[in-house]
Amino acid sequence: MNRYENVGKAELKIGDKKIELPIYEGTENERGIDVSTLREATGHITVDPGYMNTGSCTSNITFIDGDKGILRYRGIPIEELAEKASFIETAYLLIFGKLPTSEELTAFSNGLTENAPLHEDIKKFFDGFPSATHPMAILCSVVSALSGYYPYSLDPKRDESEITSTAFQLISKARTIAAYSYRKSVGEPFIYPREKFKYCQNFLHMMFSYPGEDYVPDPDMTRALELVLILHADHEQNCSTSTVRLVGSARTNLFASVAAGICALWGPLHGGANQEVMEMLEDINASGEKIDHYINEAMKPGSTKRLSGFGHRVYKTYDPRAKVLKEAFHRLVHGKSKFRGKEELLEIALRLEERALKEDFFISRKLYPNVDFYSGLIYNFLGIPTAMFPVMFAIGRVPGWIAHWKEMRETKPPRIGRPRQIYTGPAKSSYIPIEQRT
Ligand code: MLT
């Protein structure tokens, strides 16, 4: 049951003035002090760089308990979804707030199939990019350009069915654009999506098949992809999702808001982190034994080096997504799948993790493996190049962005996001004519 209740008051004393601020409690007993009247009542604002303690909204979508390592989408533990759901079912759950019936799932899946191909003119965009263009640059540009092809989506005040159509376009086409950006980078022809394939199969087909070939997607590869996308589908108010909400709060259309989210995700501190993990594991693999070197570098007093894939702003224990991926990975490389025999990088990751977690430095700072530590390994095993890792993260995150954009739009009263600041620049001064300046 969803809950947001007033459970008490906090007292704040500033000089002689005392005010009371309401305390609210959510479904899982998380508490927040509502400071929305603070400035009006006291002339003060709150200062919280990096939003370490700021709840920007209330949300029904995803619950995280970072101390206990819990992640749930609409109340359902991520471990259960990883075992039983498909990515598409998870997307439906996030966007519409409930698991779909079989009719709803079929309609949703058909909607995605119908919207998978790109308008022929969109293909010309790819000719304009140099072949070394980062695939995230292509993804955010082309996603933003989609609004030119589907103008109904530009007025987000219109009815729900148009938001749903835009959601179909985004979820389905992000995958096609991603696959085309890869084909472009390796100079191979674009492969059209095929109606007979489901979402993840179609992505593998567009990435790896050849014209005229009767491509048969490998079931282990398909399931591995499904799993990583489910685990990436939402993570409440992370940097890119907060960006989507903030951009959307200006009544910006869904294509443009999601394109902004893709830009935020591109950063190495966000969606680009799994790329760094992969580079570290490959370096260790190529150079024999460098595990100690990476760990010692991170532990050196005053060091700015971090152990890639360790630690998370929210999780102060093992990231539950990393746990699911690690287990899945074991099954893949030690089972009968195509991945068998590719265990080198996994062994290095396992040794690195074991070695790091023997050090008080990592334990006392609560630096445990996060999702990026294992997701890159899965992508690598699927044959996806490292530069595409943030793109894969984005494909997975699209349903979460849509769910948050929709929830933000439905919140009453609608408010544009507009943080305040404390000004620290020069005090009032005058214009100096150029000849008097030194
Ligand atoms: C995410 O999934 O978005 C990342 O773990 C980052 C975050 O939640 O801050």
Image: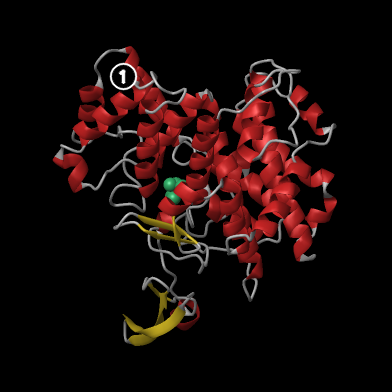
| Quadrant of res 101 | bottom right
Q: Disc 1, ligand 1: is the CB inside 8 Å?
A: no
Write the residue at 66% across / 33% down: 202
For this view, does 5 lie left or right of residue 284?
right
Q: Is residue 160 left or right of residue 236?
A: right
Outermost residue on the front side: it is 336
Residue drawn at x 69%, y 48% is 109
Q: What residue is at 63 percent from the left and 75 percent from the top? A: 412
Q: Nearer the viewer, residue 323 or 212?
A: 212
What residue is at 26 percent from the left and 34 percent from the top? 353
The amino acid marked with disc number 1 is Ile
Front-most of residues 207 and 269 = 207
Q: Judge the density around disc 1: few (<14), some (14-19), many (≥20) Cα neighbours within 10 Å.
A: many
Against 326, residue 39 (above or below) is: below
Task: Tell me the element at label 1.
Answer: helix
**Residue 200 appears in the picture as rendered:** yes
- Note whether residue 436 is visible: no
Q: Position of residue 345 (x, y in %)?
A: 35, 23
- Out of 418 and 329, give the one closest to the viewer: 329
Residue, disc 1: 284
Instruction: Give x and y (percent) for residue 64.
Output: 40, 59
Question: Compared to 269, does 349 lie above or below?
Answer: above
Residue 98: % across, % down: 58, 64
Q: Residue furthest top?
A: 287
Question: Residue 67 in the image: x percent, y percent?
Answer: 29, 57
